[in-house]
Image (cartoon, rainbow, N blue to C red):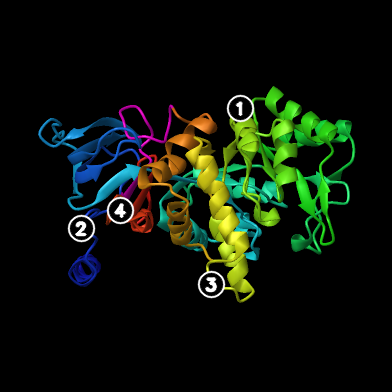
Amino acid sequence: MKIRSFFIGLAVFFILFFPMPACFSQVIAPTESLALVGAKIYPDPIKKPILNGVVLIENGKIVKVGTRDRIKVPSGARLIDCKGLVMMPGFWNCHVHFMEPRWQKVDSLPVEQLNQQLKTMLTRYGFTYVFDLATLDLANLLSLRNRIEKGEVDGPAILTAGVPFAPEGGSPFYIAPLKLPELSTAASAVEYVNNQFDSGADAIKLWSASPDGKKVVPMPMEIIKAATAAAHKKGKVVFAHPTTLEGVRIAQEGVVDIIAHVAADDRVDWSRQMISDMRSSQMALIPTLKLHQWELERFGDTTGNNPLLLTAIQQLRSYAKAGGEILFGTDVGYMSDYSPVDEYILMGKAGMDYLQILAALTTSPAKRFGRQKQTGSIKAGMNADLVLLSADPADDVKNFAAVKYTISKGRIIFQ
């Protein structure tokens, strides 16, 4: 009895002095029937918002979405009051890295440590899917993914481009003393690509033009075409780091699917012909504008009007205005500043409104990576991948980062 009384007293103490947040009073099991009630819901970037909405979730799936007066909440469901919050589909970050020392030997890291690291870097910002675009230890990254998929660790779904490669003599100077695999023949490119997929990679990344510290080394066309053909044969996508306008041209002619950055190094906007060629090839762009701002600030330039940054903004403006597909990504993990707020602000400066940014965060990557029947919108039959915000991005795009809760497949991974 004394033991029982002790635990009852302890429970009362925590309830009184450490109350749970209003929206989620308890941890939600992924198999539980759940009703999220009262939020303003953006089902996707095209449909009108649902005011005073209800989302019913069972076994990690969305079963019903609608207004409070039309949706009957089952008597056995846990009802969660989300009045005053804004609900959106779970966000994608299509350019991340798990390369910092803290991610080494993930098999042996405690669950609490991994949860905190994932929270600090990703889940606190609403990311339910991420694409890692360079790892030097693919097996280690796959171990992290496995721990998340088993439900042991609270993290986003992880896709990976494995270990990227560069042209011969073209390992980028900024990763020194590390070096990337450098390929010199079409045959070696095909073999490398197939080995990456056999090892568990979901995509391929390459440098179509790589700065070695003295010059920019272009990827030979026969190598890039062999690599993309091998990847496309397996139904996989190819990312390219372009560096320069020439790198963009090589990537486009080499049938690359996604440009992993704008190419601001030349301080020149993309021409109409280049944009037309990119759109004809159905190339997507991950801008990573904050990366340029962050690099400039590291070297003391905090003006915000450096030609490098202004060119990056202009290139995004030109491609988005022309109807080019934009995918959200920040290069976080290479950048030590994890917040995406500045990326939202800079995308806004490039002329993108909140619905275009929402598409870059949700429907566009879901479709690009073949997940549109599972995630990217809020409707019956989809995975319960959701973000709840305390403020509406329609009022200020910075509010995309005002995340209160992140839910992946019905499981709360941040609160």
Q: Earlier in the sequence, mark 2 or mark 4?
A: 2
User: Of helix, strand and loop, which mostly describes the magenta segment?
Assistant: loop
Q: Residue at x 74, y 62 (%)?
A: 174
Place of residue 315 in the rendered image (x, y in percent of width and height, measured from the top left)? 57, 48
In the image, the segment drawn in magenta is 373-389
| Label located before the other in sequence (3 or 1) | 1
Q: CA distance from mark 1 to mark 4?
A: 36 Å
Residue 213 in view, yes or no: yes
Helix or strand or loop: what does disc 3 sit on? loop
Among the 4 quarters of the image, the one containing residue 195: top right
- Say which residue label 1 marks: 280
- Please, what is the three-letter code of the amino acid marked with disc 1? Ser
**Residue bearing mark 3:** 303
Q: Please say if 407 is above or below 250.
A: below
- Residue marked by disc 2: 22
Q: Which mark is residue 389?
A: 4
